[in-house]
Amino acid sequence: MKSEYRQNRLTGEWVIFAPSRRRRPKDFVREKQAQGQSAYDSGCPFCAGNEDMLSEIVFESSSDNAFGWSARAVYNKYPALNPEGDTIRSWDGMHLGANGFGSHLVLVETPRHDLQMHKMSRSELETVIETYSSCYAYLEADPKVMLVMIFKNYGASAGASLFHPHSQLVASGIVPKYVRDREREAQKYFDELGHCLLCDMLAFELVSRERVVYANAGFVCFVPYAAESPFELWIASRRHMADFRDIRHNEVKDLAEVLQWSLKAIAEKLNSPDYNMTINSCTRYKSNEPQLHWYIRIVPRLTTRAGFEIGTGMSINPSLPEADAEFLRS
């Protein structure tokens, strides 16, 4: 099979698909290193009972379980950004800089040390999503915050330093170029056609069905046409929403179902690989704009970016999205 280029309409970036380098789906399954299976670890700061190791608790979802809580958020002890200061830019000769203003929370997804997200019940995932939403609103309340990024690093190669199930939220006083470029691509598409790009993408994928792996009344999970890496998944709402904050209670249930299925499929089919998950929502002042649509992106760590990717910024994916979707559906 010949190689081909595909464009990611959401970012404008091109991806090279090289089927000649393709391996069988089973070849992407990596041997998983043994992890702690105990429900409690005396040295883990996130385990229930080890609160003396934690920084300030910002938010807690109450529960009738033995611990009294089901999910909680704390300030990161080693934050990427700090809430002190402002967002004023300053010049250093010809170079532009700014204070490292922002906030950095860790969301502890469960009191149990061994209950990873792909093993959670649907109700437990609903609690995590609701806690995401509450913490998102808490950080966004600061008018100096321009962007809130929710993300999860699972496994050492994905950047996780602790095994206990957790996610992170970083509030930034600056909008990164990558995020702004994504918004500009959506704006360009809307200006030309009068439609939301992701709404149109979802409609096309639901008709094609080639890359859809799971869907319910509220959300659709699919392998994007120009996936940058093998088994990359996007989860998007059928209802147009620019801002993650606008998710409704019934949609939390639908999202929990789709997220549960997606993470289980990755864990079972690919032997629980390391992965990164991000919730890509709009930036400040964009929540009511018709061209933007929030979505979740899940990227299993199955390949390594090498010289060509680093030098050009263009990804090479040896696995076709249609084959990946079929493998996960099966």
Image (cartoon, rainbow, N blue to C red):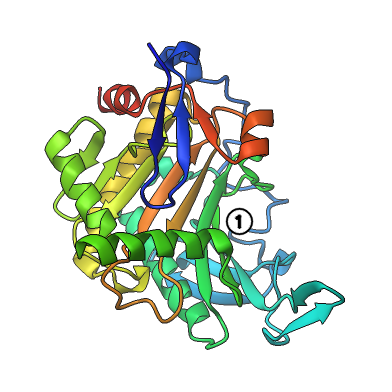
User: In this image, 161 relative to 48: left or right?
Assistant: right
Left or right: 260 in relation to 76? left
Q: Residue at x 28, y 43 (%)?
A: 221
Q: Nearer the viewer, residue 92 or 106?
A: 92
Q: Where is residue 177 in the image (x, y as percent from the top left)?
A: 57, 63
Q: In this view, does 41 lie above or below 185?
A: above
Answer yes or no: is residue 20 visible. yes
Please name the amino acid that badge 1 sits on. Cys
Q: Residue 238's image quarter? A: bottom left
Q: Where is residue 118 in the image (x, y as percent from the top left)?
A: 41, 41
The residue where tag 1 is placed is 47
Q: Quadrant of the N terminus?
A: top left
Left or right, residue 220 beside residue 245: left
Q: In this view, does 193 lie above or below 234?
A: below
Q: Name the one closer to the observer, 248 or 292.
A: 292
Q: Where is residue 134 in the image (x, y as percent from the top left)?
A: 42, 74
- Where residue 126 appears, x then y in whole percent? 33, 59
Q: Residue sitting at 48 percent across and 30 percent down?
A: 272
- Find numbered disc 1 in the image and state the secondary structure of the residue it sits on: loop
